[in-house]
Image (cartoon, rainbow, N blue to C red):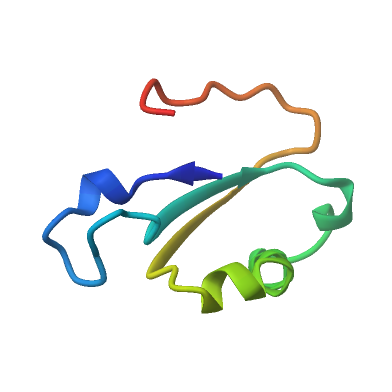
């Protein structure tokens, strides 16, 4: 999970203290073979409590399980 709230200050859904805009980058064998919509639904279901706790926006990046990733420097 990458908190990108600082990039959205002043935008809709932003609030003092952040924790409103996130990006999740995930690779899991459980997501392999599922459609993009099914992958996103599974991730949203897994994060249900966090989302209901005030997350305004969630960007989801599903990567091939085990694929190397380069995380942005803002992490």
Question: Seen in the image, is 33 located left or right of residue 63?
Answer: right
**Most foreground residue, 53 or 45:** 53
Instruction: Choose between 71 and 18: the one closer to the eye.
Output: 18
Please state the horizontal and vertical placement of residue 19, each as a whole percent of the image: 40, 56
Quarter of the image for residue 9 reads bottom left
Which residue is rendered at x = 54% and y = 21% of the image? 70
- Measured along the vertical axis of the image, is residue 2 above or below residue 11? above
> Quarter of the image containing the N terminus?
top right
Q: Residue placed at 64% from the left, 67% from the top?
A: 40
Q: In this image, 18 relative to 40: left or right?
A: left
Total count of labels: 0
**Above or below, 23 relative to 55:** above
Q: Position of residue 27 (x, y in %)?
A: 74, 42
Which residue occupies the extreme bottom position in the image?
Answer: 52
Quadrant housing residue 38: bottom right
Q: Name the residue located 24 percent from the left edge and 64 percent from the top edge.
A: 15
Q: Quadrant of residue 11?
A: bottom left
On screen, residue 51 above or below 64: below
Q: Is residue 5 left or right of residue 50?
A: left
Q: Residue furthest front?
A: 17
- Going by the picture, which residue comes out furthest to the left? 10
The picture places residue 56, in percent across and down from the top left corner, at 38, 70
Q: Quadrant of the C terminus?
A: top left
Q: Is residue 17 left or right of residue 57?
A: left
Q: Residue at x 51, y 25 (%)?
A: 71
26 over 41 or under it: above or below = above
């Amino acid at each position: 999970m990458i908190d990108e709230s600082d990039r959205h200050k002043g935008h809709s859904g932003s609030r003092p203290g952040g924790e409103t805009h996130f990006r999740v980058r995930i690779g899991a064998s459980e997501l392999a073979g599922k459609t993009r919509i099914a992958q996103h639904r599974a991730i949203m279901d897994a994060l249900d409590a966090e989302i209901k706790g005030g997350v305004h926006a969630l960007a989801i990046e599903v990567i091939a399980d085990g694929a190397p990733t380069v995380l942005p420097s803002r992490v």
